[in-house]
Image (tube, coloured by chain):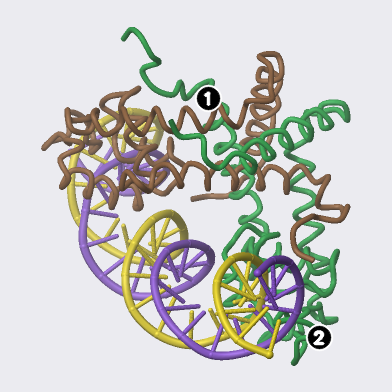
Chain colours: A green, B brown, C yellow, D purple
DNA sequence: CACGATATGTCAGACTACTGACATGAGTCA
DNA sequence: TGACTCATGTCAGTAGTCTGACATATCGTG
């Protein structure tokens, strides 16, 4: 109980609070998506495809923060369910462009509305200026973590 | 045509940014803990026990954002490894108080230092005032999400 | 042109965390 | 006292994600 910190002070640790907030959001999203038969990654994939049609498996994986192997499993399921379609041949390289089907867009519509409500609930106590501050702060954290991968000493 | 994200709705969604930040932190922590043979939940459990000795399995689960079933499996492994000890009998109710062993504290020390470095890297661009703002904002989000939902577990 | 480096798609196995289910201990209330 | 409710510990099965491995396609460099 002297010299260097004894550990991470959980009550004020931003790392811990970030995990807590993310966990709370995850649970809340799960709660609204589950009744629709969707997982969070499932929804995220559809949302990403709606905004950026033609993304490949690897690009979708990066955008949803899972490995390309996991996304591959998911995409195969979504394709079987008729929610997305993948090009049979790669226009360039090996990347196969993926797009939503009408059924996919329909399923996404309901899910997207529910998720938007969850996000609005989360931000209920924050005014527009607060939300801008939060964007700036989160962006700074993401940038800092993505940059220097090797800071060991 | 990989790296680099064109400006889309997702880039301003605080839900998405929160997930991105959490994912980046998760990866960074994983990268430093893996060489030590620890997972994030493993480390989190030890850190929590160091600050709140005597926590029960269910309390540890809540503090690390996993189910009590998952924590039970982890605790059994940690006990086999001699990192924690659990009371043989419950002093009251069914909750079994858990505490770190000397070996557990030793392993935690190295891990905690590494994690602290990761957290400091993440906050490198934020001054103390920014960090206070971030605490307030995250707390507001957590509170807002923990209140309304009326789902059972 | 050949070679290596990089990026992608995909299959297979392993692991982590989750859901479901049941038993036990403590508190509440009629 | 007995019934009800809630929290806890634990076992079993399931689901989602990960790591490892391999084949293929493009680009840069010599």
User: Tag 2, which secondary structure?
Assistant: loop
Vertical arrangement, residue B15 with respect to residue C26, above or below: below
Assess disc 1: are there few (<14), some (14-19) or many (≥20) residues with their C-alpha within 10 Å of its C-alpha: some
Q: In what element is the residue under mark 1?
A: loop
Residue drawn where x is 51% and y is 33% of the image: B118
State yes or no: discs 2 and 1 in contact (Cβ < 8 Å).
no
Q: Quadrant of residue A37?
A: bottom right
Q: Nearer the viewer, residue B22 or A58?
A: A58
> Residue at horizontal 26%, vertical 34%?
B107
Q: Which of marks 2 and 1 is nearer the N terminus?
A: 1
Q: Which mark is residue B82?
A: none
Q: Mark 1 points at which residue?
A: A13
Graded by Cα atoms within 10 Å as few (under 14), some (14 to 19) or many (20 or more), the crowding at tag 2 reads: few
The numbered mark 1 sits on a residue in which chain?
A
Image x and y of residue A150, in percent: 52, 40
The N terminus of chain A - image quarter: top left
Q: Position of residue A7 (x, y in %)?
A: 39, 22
Q: In this view, does A119 lie to the left or right of A13?
A: right
Q: For marks 2 and 1, give the one nearer the viewer.
A: 2
Q: Which residue is drawn at 46% across and 46% down?
A: B31
Query: Mark 2 = which residue?
Result: A91
- Furthest toward the top, the residue is A2
On the rendered structure, is B103 left or right of A139? left
From the image, which quarter does the C terminus of chain A lie in?
top left
Percent x, y of residue A144: 65, 35
Q: Is residue B18 visible?
A: yes
Q: How far apart are marks 2 and 1 (CA)?
A: 48 Å
Picture layout, residue B127 above or below residue C26: above
């Amino acid at each position: 109980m002297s010299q260097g910190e004894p550990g991470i002070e959980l009550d004020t640790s931003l790392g811990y609070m970030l995990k807590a907030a993310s966990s709370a959001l995850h649970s809340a999203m799960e709660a609204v998506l589950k009744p629709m038969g969707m997982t969070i990654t499932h929804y995220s994939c559809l949302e990403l495809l709606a905004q950026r049609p033609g993304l490949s498996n690897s690009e979708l994986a990066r955008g949803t923060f899972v490995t390309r192997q996991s996304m591959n499993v998911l995409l195969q399921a979504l394709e079987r369910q008729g929610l997305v379609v993948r090009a049979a041949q790669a226009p360039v390289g090996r990347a196969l462009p993926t797009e939503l089907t009408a059924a996919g867009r329909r399923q996404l519509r309901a899910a997207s509305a529910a998720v938007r409500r969850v996000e609005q609930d989360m931000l209920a106590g924050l005014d527009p200026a607060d939300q801008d501050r939060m964007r700036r702060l989160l962006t700074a954290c993401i940038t800092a973590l993505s940059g220097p991968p090797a800071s060991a000493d």
